């Protein structure tokens, strides 16, 4: 009888502990060419958890990391395993659009919230997924301001669009092309390339042969963009090499890109969703805490910030009473102007952040510092 | 010079430069196949190890410890990558390939190259992390302009080193005793053994030379690649294609095919679009397999390597 009673108590406590946990699955690339995303995401998540002391409102935030490798196949396998074994209430991921699209239907079928922090493809929040939310501006939200700055601030009439051959790259390129042409601009060429392209001299030569190019919107991962900028400078296409073209980009590039690309990045105009120099208290507190944890010489990037924000948003939902997947979804849907390091979050009916305060423009100066551009 | 002529000349220059990089990667592959009749799937990782060796030699050891200027440090890093490739080849051959070869099984060494590849990739991931390194060669910052044509000093270094390596390899194989013995092993391992040549030693030497070449290719590619533990993988498929187009195991064929693929890529970018590079190269590969399965230069065992 005594043994039966103890077993009953153990079951009750175990069940109670289970219900007081918020299980967060994290599907990020930890291997492969996109693995820098996963490493930076983890840094942001760990910092947020540390600051929250791992719990909110008595609910322990339990996190499990999985390597989804920017790959639709691996991401699918990882999410199935998470659902089967970890039984998450929410999954943060993936960074790459193709992988994010692959896991969205699985999570929605399982009625588990997907919080996306880094994919641009329109389809993610345009496919009617009820449990998918994104705090990252989608391709149109990035491209519309880019066109506005290209034509309004830079007075651009001609453009060459450069992008990697992925869902994200295609969407960004299309998102720029349509409104740019609709407003009277001329796209001289749209040049796509695989992620295995290393030498961009031939591409730069082709662009140089196209005549005067005012702007070059570029959508690719950091490593390729560094080489591309250097090749464009060498071919005297862009300002950094003595040309007149202005390379434009969006949130693909982390903080520190300009130092890697060197003088070739001079004049580069781009959207940064996170500016570590922003004076907002939340940003400065985050930068200070990040440096304290990871080293004074390490400045957080937008990838660190997005992952940090994801945990803050989940914590906010829990603070407002969420305790499972369904209630997290409900709370997210009610979010309005929730402040995070990258700006303010208000989800629209499709789960897309609708507040463009998360879009900041900067121009790289001769000394490789940033100058903020007023665009709105 | 007319616009078209300038453009054709410029893209040809770009193509030759790119082709030389491909040749440097493909030489080791073809050398191993020529002598061992074996494909080395770990070759890409030897290239990556070479790139990292060059990176750390150029940016830490040669500049900070030896106090060399940037240009000299980069040249030293090429030699260091060559040496590291050779050492790695020696170690991997002694620890993995040689014992498996002694068992007389041809499949196991092939599978072992995949194992070595995964091991090296993950070891580098653990050591260097996944965030790409920025490997800048001081020569890449210097642009030479001749009329309307331009090329970086780095491309001069790449073409120069490639030419020197090809000449040295050719001389070694043609005029030295070891080179002749190596060719004898490539033609007929058993008969070479009966003539007093130690095939095991020469196979080991082949792996060391091929690995050293891969290391050197990594040093030349480093300032071009997105330097991460997976860097070599981005060029290896193209290198395999070049080896097949040139004629598996045939050095001359590999050199011609490498340059040809580089030039075809440059003109594909200009006139068809960079997104079609792989399509064009692999259509060429398939056409070659159908029309001339032995490659550009027909395989003749006695002339290979």
Image (cartoon, coloured by chain):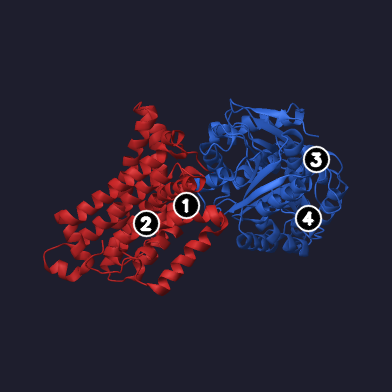
User: Which residue is at the front of the view, B215 or A364?
Assistant: A364
Please determine if labels 3 and 2 lie on a single subunit: no
Residue A4 in view here? yes
Disc number placed over residue B122 in the picture, else none? 1
Labelled disc at residue A157 = none
- Both on one chain, marks 4 and 2? no
Which quadrant of the figure has residue A225?
top right
Q: Label 3 marks which chain's residue?
A: A
- Subunit ID for the residue under disc 1: B
The residue depicted at 67 percent of the width and 56 percent of the height is A167
Instruction: Quote the CA–CA distance across marks 3 and 2.
Output: 49 Å
Q: Residues within 10 Å of mark 2 (few under 14, many from 20)?
A: many
Q: Is residue B32 left or right of residue B21?
A: left
- Secondary structure state at the residue bearing disc 1: helix
Left or right: residue B229 compared with residue A40? left
The answer to whether the residue labelled 4 contacts the one labelled 1, judged by CB atoms less than 8 Å apart, is no
Q: Which numbered disc, 2 or 1, marks the residue closer to the eye?
A: 2
Residue tagged by mark 2?
B26
**For discs 1 and 3, the disc positioned in front in the rendered view:** 3
Mark 3 or mark 4, which is nearer the start of the sequence? 4
Say whether mark 3 and mark 4 are on the same chain.
yes
x then y, percent, for residue B201: 20, 58
Quadrant location, the N terminus of chain A? bottom right
Q: Secondary structure at mark 4?
A: helix
Give left or right: position of A288 versus B111: right
**Chain B drawn colour:** red
Spatial distance from mark 1 to mark 3, Cα to Cα? 40 Å
Mark seen at residue A125: 4
Q: Secondary structure at mark 3?
A: helix
Decide which of A5, B69 is in the foreground and name it: B69
Which residue was labeled with disc 3?
A356
Q: Are marks 4 and 1 on the same chain?
A: no
């Amino acid at each position: 009888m005594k043994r039966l009673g103890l077993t009953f108590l153990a079951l009750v406590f175990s069940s109670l502990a289970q219900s007081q946990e918020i299980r967060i699955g994290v599907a990020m690339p930890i291997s492969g060419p996109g693995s820098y995303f996963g490493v930076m995401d983890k840094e942001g998540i760990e910092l947020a958890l540390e600051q929250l002391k791992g719990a909110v409102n008595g609910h322990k935030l339990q996190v499990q990391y999985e390597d989804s490798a920017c790959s639709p196949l691996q991401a699918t396998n990882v999410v199935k395993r998470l659902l089967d074994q970890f039984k998450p209430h929410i999954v943060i991921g993936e960074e790459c659009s193709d992988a994010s699209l692959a896991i969205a239907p699985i999570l929605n079928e399982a009625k588990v919230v997907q919080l996306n922090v880094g994919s641009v493809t329109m389809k993610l929040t345009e496919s009617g997924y009820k449990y998918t939310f994104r705090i990252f501006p989608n391709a149109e939200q990035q491209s519309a301001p880019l066109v506005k700055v290209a034509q309004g601030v830079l007075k651009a009439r001609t453009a060459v669009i450069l992008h990697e051959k992925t869902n994200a790259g295609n969407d960004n390129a299309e998102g720029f092309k349509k409104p740019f042409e609709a407003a009277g601009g001329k796209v001289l060429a749209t040049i796509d390339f695989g992620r295995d392209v290393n030498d961009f001299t031939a591409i730069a030569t082709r662009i140089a042969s196209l005549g005067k190019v005012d702007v070059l919107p570029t959508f690719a991962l950091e490593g390729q963009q560094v080489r591309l900028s250097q090749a464009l400078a060498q071919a005297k296409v862009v300002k950094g090499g003595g040309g007149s073209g202005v390379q434009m980009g969006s949130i693909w590039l982390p903080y520190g890109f300009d130092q890697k690309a060197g003088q070739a990045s001079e004049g580069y105009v781009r959207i940064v969703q996170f500016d570590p120099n922003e004076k907002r208290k939340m940003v400065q507190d985050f930068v200070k805490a990040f440096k304290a944890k990871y080293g004074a010489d390490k400045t957080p990037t937008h990838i660190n910030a997005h992952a940090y924000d994801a945990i803050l948003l989940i914590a906010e939902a829990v603070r407002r009473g969420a305790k499972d997947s369904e209630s997290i979804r409900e709370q997210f849907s009610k979010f309005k102007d929730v402040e995070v390091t990258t700006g303010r979050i208000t989800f629209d009916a499709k789960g897309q952040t609708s507040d463009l305060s998360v879009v900041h423009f900067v121009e790289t100066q001769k000394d490789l510092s940033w100058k903020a551009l007023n665009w709105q | 010079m007319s616009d078209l002529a300038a453009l054709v000349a410029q893209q040809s220059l770009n193509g030759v430069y790119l082709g030389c990089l491909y040749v440097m990667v493909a030489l080791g592959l073809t050398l191993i196949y020529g002598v061992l009749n074996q494909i080395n799937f770990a070759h890409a990782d030897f290239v990556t190890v070479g790139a990292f060796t060059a990176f750390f030699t150029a940016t830490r050891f040669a500049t900070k410890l030896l106090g060399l200027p940037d240009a000299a440090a980069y040249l030293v890093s090429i030699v260091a990558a060559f040496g590291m490739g050779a050492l790695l080849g020696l170690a991997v051959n002694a620890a993995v390939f040689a014992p498996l070869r002694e068992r007389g099984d041809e499949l196991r060494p092939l599978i072992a190259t995949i194992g070595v590849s995964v091991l090296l990739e993950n070891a580098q991931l653990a050591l260097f992390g996944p965030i790409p390194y920025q490997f800048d060669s001081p020569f890449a910052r210097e642009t030479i302009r001749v009329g309307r044509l331009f090329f970086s000093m780095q491309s001069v270094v790449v073409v120069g080193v490639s030419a020197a390596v090809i000449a040295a390899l050719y001389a070694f194989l043609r005029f030295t005793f070891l080179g002749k013995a190596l060719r004898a092993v490539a033609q007929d391992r058993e008969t070479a053994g009966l003539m007093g040549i130690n095939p095991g030693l020469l196979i080991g030497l082949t792996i060391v030379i091929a690995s050293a070449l891969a290391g050197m290719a990594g040093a030349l590619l480093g300032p071009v690649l997105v330097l991460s533990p997976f860097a070599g993988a981005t060029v290896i498929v193209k290198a395999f294609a070049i080896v097949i187009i040139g004629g598996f195991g045939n050095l001359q064929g590999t050199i011609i095919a490498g340059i040809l693929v580089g030039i075809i890529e440059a003109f594909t970018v200009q006139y068809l679009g960079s997104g079609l590079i792989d399509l064009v190269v692999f259509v060429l590969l398939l056409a070659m397999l159908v029309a001339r399965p032995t490659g550009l230069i027909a395989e003749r065992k006695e002339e290979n390597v």
